[in-house]
Image (cartoon, rainbow, N blue to C red):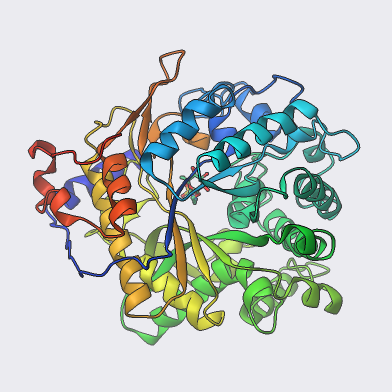
C-alpha cells in the first residue's frame, strides 16, 4: 500500500518544476559546515573488543527479521576499522566539523558505569585525536538510539531510573573525552526514541504501548538531559569549557487551508509534537506546553485513567530543565499540511491527543523514503518558529538530508537539488528573518544502516558498497557540490543544472577534487 501511494506521488511530482532561486546571499564568515553519522548506523564490530549488546543488535538479530532487507548493523560501514581512512575523506571534503555518536554499550557493556571498556574508550580516543589532527571539530552525540540491552530489560526509557544511568554514562564520557570534545549533544531526537521506540514500535526496542510509553519515555529523557547538562556545568564546565545541547527533530506543520480551524490545528501540531520536547528546555516558563497538559489531562480523565497519561514535573525539575542548553540542535527533513481531526484516531493515543491529521501536498516531490518529501520552505518556517517561541536561541542544524534508492546513481541530482534548495532557505532565514543559525550538518557523511529500512535507502554524500567486504566509499556528485559550498560559503547554482528535471542526462562538470 505504502509503495503504491509512493508510486502515484512520484508520477505526479515528475510534472512539477522546482523553484530553484539564487538569492545571492552568502553564509556568514564564521558559519560552520559538517556531516553526521550515528554509531549503530556505521560502526559495525557489534561484538568486538568487549562491546555489549544494545537494543538494535537484539532487534536486528530477531527472527523473523525486523528490517526490510533482513539486514543488521553487524558490519554496516565497518567504520570501527576505518578511522584513519574516514577522517581523510572528511578532510578532503573540507568539513569544519564531524558529528558522530558514541555507542553506550561499547563504552559500558552492561550500561552501568561500574565497568568502562578500555577498548571502547580507545576507539573514540583514536577517532577524536585523528579528527583534531586534521583540524576537524568533533561534535559528539552521547545517545543516538542504541540503548544497552541490559538497561532495556530493566524497562528502558519509560523507567525513571534511566535518568540515573544516563547521567552516570554522560559523566564517564565527559571525563574521558571532554578535554578534547567541546560540543556535546545529549540526545538525538527524543521524539523518535520515545514515539517510535515505545508508542508505535517503528524503532528499537519496538514496543507498541500506544498512549503510554511515549509520554513516560519523554519525561525520563527530558529529566536525563537536564541533569546531564547541570552535571556538566558543576563538574566539567570550568575546566573543559565546552557546550552542551540537545537535538530535537520536527516535521513542519503548515495549515492545509487558510481557515482558522486549520491554522489552529497546524500550530497545535507544532506545539504538541515539537514543543512537547523543546518547551521544557527552551521556553521562558519551562514545563510542557500548556495545551499539551490541558488536552492530555482532560482526555485521560474522560478515558477513565486514574491519573494523566502525561506525567508531571516537580517545580524543582521544571527549574532544573529550563534553560539547560547552550544551543538548539535541530534535525529537519520534511513537512506536512495539517487539518483538524476530531475523529477517534485510535483513542486513547497521542494522535487523538493532538487531534490533527497531516497530509502530503501532491505538488511536493517525493524521495525514496515514504515520509520524506522535498519541502524546502518548511525549514525556514521551523527556524522562524524556534526564533519566535524560544527567544532566538543559537541553532545548529544537526541533520538535514535526502533519501534515494539502493541503486541510485552516483550522479545524485535529486540530492544535490535538495541540499541547494534547503540551504537557500537557511540563507533566507539568516539574512531576511535574522534567525541565529550558526552551523549546518548534512545527513549523512556516507550511506549507512537506515534503521528499519536496512540498506534499501541511501542518505550519504559518499556511496558505500555494502556488497564489498572492504566497504569502499565513493564520492557522489552531492559530495562535490557540498565541498564546493563549504569552500565558497555560497550555493553555486552554476555548478548544478539549472533545469533539474533534465538532471539525469545533463553532464556535470566536477570542479572540486575529492
Ligand atoms: C533521522 O531521523 C535520524 O536521526 C537518523 O538516524 C536517520 O538515519 C535519518 O533521520 C534518516 O531517516 O515511517 O512514517 O513512521 C529522522 C526523523 C522521523 C525519520 C520518523 C523516520 C519515520 C516516520 N525520522 N520517520 S514513519
Query: Which residue appears at 42% of the width and 47% of the height?
Result: 95
Extreme top residue here? 469
Relative placement, left or right, of 474 versus 400 is: left
Q: Write the residue at 24% across / 31% down.
A: 409
Percent x, y of residue 84: 52, 27
The residue at the far bottom in this view is 260
Q: Quadrant of the N terminus?
A: top left
Report the residue at 32% width, 68% height from top: 427
The answer to whether residue 455 is above or below residue 16 is: above
**Location of residue 70 in the rendering, given as x and y in whole percent from the top left corner:** 51, 22
When the figure is inspected, residue 452 is found, relative to residue 235, above or below; the finding is above
Closer to the camera in the image, 79 or 402: 79
- Location of residue 338 (image quadrant): bottom left
Residue 61 seen: yes
Question: Where's the C terminus, which quadrant?
Answer: top left
Please name whichever residue, 448 or 395, is drawn nearer the observer in this view of the structure. Answer: 395
Please indicate whether residue 358 sits to the left or right of residue 327 in the image: left
Residue 86 in the image: state x and y as whole percent: 48, 31
Q: Is residue 449 visible?
A: no
Amino acid at each position: 500500500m505504502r509503495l503504491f501511494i509512493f508510486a502515484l506521488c512520484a508520477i505526479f511530482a515528475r510534472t512539477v518544476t522546482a523553484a530553484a532561486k539564487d538569492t545571492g546571499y552568502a553564509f556568514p564568515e564564521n558559519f560552520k559546515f559538517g556531516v553526521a553519522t550515528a554509531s549503530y548506523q556505521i560502526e559495525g564490530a557489534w561484538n568486538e573488543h568487549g562491546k555489549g549488546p544494545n537494543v538494535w543488535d537484539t532487534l536486528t538479530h530477531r527472527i523473523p527479521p525486523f528490517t526490510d532487507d533482513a539486514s543488521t548493523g553487524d558490519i554496516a560501514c565497518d567504520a570501527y576499522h576505518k578511522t584513519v581512512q574516514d577522517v581523510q575523506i572528511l578532510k578532503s571534503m573540507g568539513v569544519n566539523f564531524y558529528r558522530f555518536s558514541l555507542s553506550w554499550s561499547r563504552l559500558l557493556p552492561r550500561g552501568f558505569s561500574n565497568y568502562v571498556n578500555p577498548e571502547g574508550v580507545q576507539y573514540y580516543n583514536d577517532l577524536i585525536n585523528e579528527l583534531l589532527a586534521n583540524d576537524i571539530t568533533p561534535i559528539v552525540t552521547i545517545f543516538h538510539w542504541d540503548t544497552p540491552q541490559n538497561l532495556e530489560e530493566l524497562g528502558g526509557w519509560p523507567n525513571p531510573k534511566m535518568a540515573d544511568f544516563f547521567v552516570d554514562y554522560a559523566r564517564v564520557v565527559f571525563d574521558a573525552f571532554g578535554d578534547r570534545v567541546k560540543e556535546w549533544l545529549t540526545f538525538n531526537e527524543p521524539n523518535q526514541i520515545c514515539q517510535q521506540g515505545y508508542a508505535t514500535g517503528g524503532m528499537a526496542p519496538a514496543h507498541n504501548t500506544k498512549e503510554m510509553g511515549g509520554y513516560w519515555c519523554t519525561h525520563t529523557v527530558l529529566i536525563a538531559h537536564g541533569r546531564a547538562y547541570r552535571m556538566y556545568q558543576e563538574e566539567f564546565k570550568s575546566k573543559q569549557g565546552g557546550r552542551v545541547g540537545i537535538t530535537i527533530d520536527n516535521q513542519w506543520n503548515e495549515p492545509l487551508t487558510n481557515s482558522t480551524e486549520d491554522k489552529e490545528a497546524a500550530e497545535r501540531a507544532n506545539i504538541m509534537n515539537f514543543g512537547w520536547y523543546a518547551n521544557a528546555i527552551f521556553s521562558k516558563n519551562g514545563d510542557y506546553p500548556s495545551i499539551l497538559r490541558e488536552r492530555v489531562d482532560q482526555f485521560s480523565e474522560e478515558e477513565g485513567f486514574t491519573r494523566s497519561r502525561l506525567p508531571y514535573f516537580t517545580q524543582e525539575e521544571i527549574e532544573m530543565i529550563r534553560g539547560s542548553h547552550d544551543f538548539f540542535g535541530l534535525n529537519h527533513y520534511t513537512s506536512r499540511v495539517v487539518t483538524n481531526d476530531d475523529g477517534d484516531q485510535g483513542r486513547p493515543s497521542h494522535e487523538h491527543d493532538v487531534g490533527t491529521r497531516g497530509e502530503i501536498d501532491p505538488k511536493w516531490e517525493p524521495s525514496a523514503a515514504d515520509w520524506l518529501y522535498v519541502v524546502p520552505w518548511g525549514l525556514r518556517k521551523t527556524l522562524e518558529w524556534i526564533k519566535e517561541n524560544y527567544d532566538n536561541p543559537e541553532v545548529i542544524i544537526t541533520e538535514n538530508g535526502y533519501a534515494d534508492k539502493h541503486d541510485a546513481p552516483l550522479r545524485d541530482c535529486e540530492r544535490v537539488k535538495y541540499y541547494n534548495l534547503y540551504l537557500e532557505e537557511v540563507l533566507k532565514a539568516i539574512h531576511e528573518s535574522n534567525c541565529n543559525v550558526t552551523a549546518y550538518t548534512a545527513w549523512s557523511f556516507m550511506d549507512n544502516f537506515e534503521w528499519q529500512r536496512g540498506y534499501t535507502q541511501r542518505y550519504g554524500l559518499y556511496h558505500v558498497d555494502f556488497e564489498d567486504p572492504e566497504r569502499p566509499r565513493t564520492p557522489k556528485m552531492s559530495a562535490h557540490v557540498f565541498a564546493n559550498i563549504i569552500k565558497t560559503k555560497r550555493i553555486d547554482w552554476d555548478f548544478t543544472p539549472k533545469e533539474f528535471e533534465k538532471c539525469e542526462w545533463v553532464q556535470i562538470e566536477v570542479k572540486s577534487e575529492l
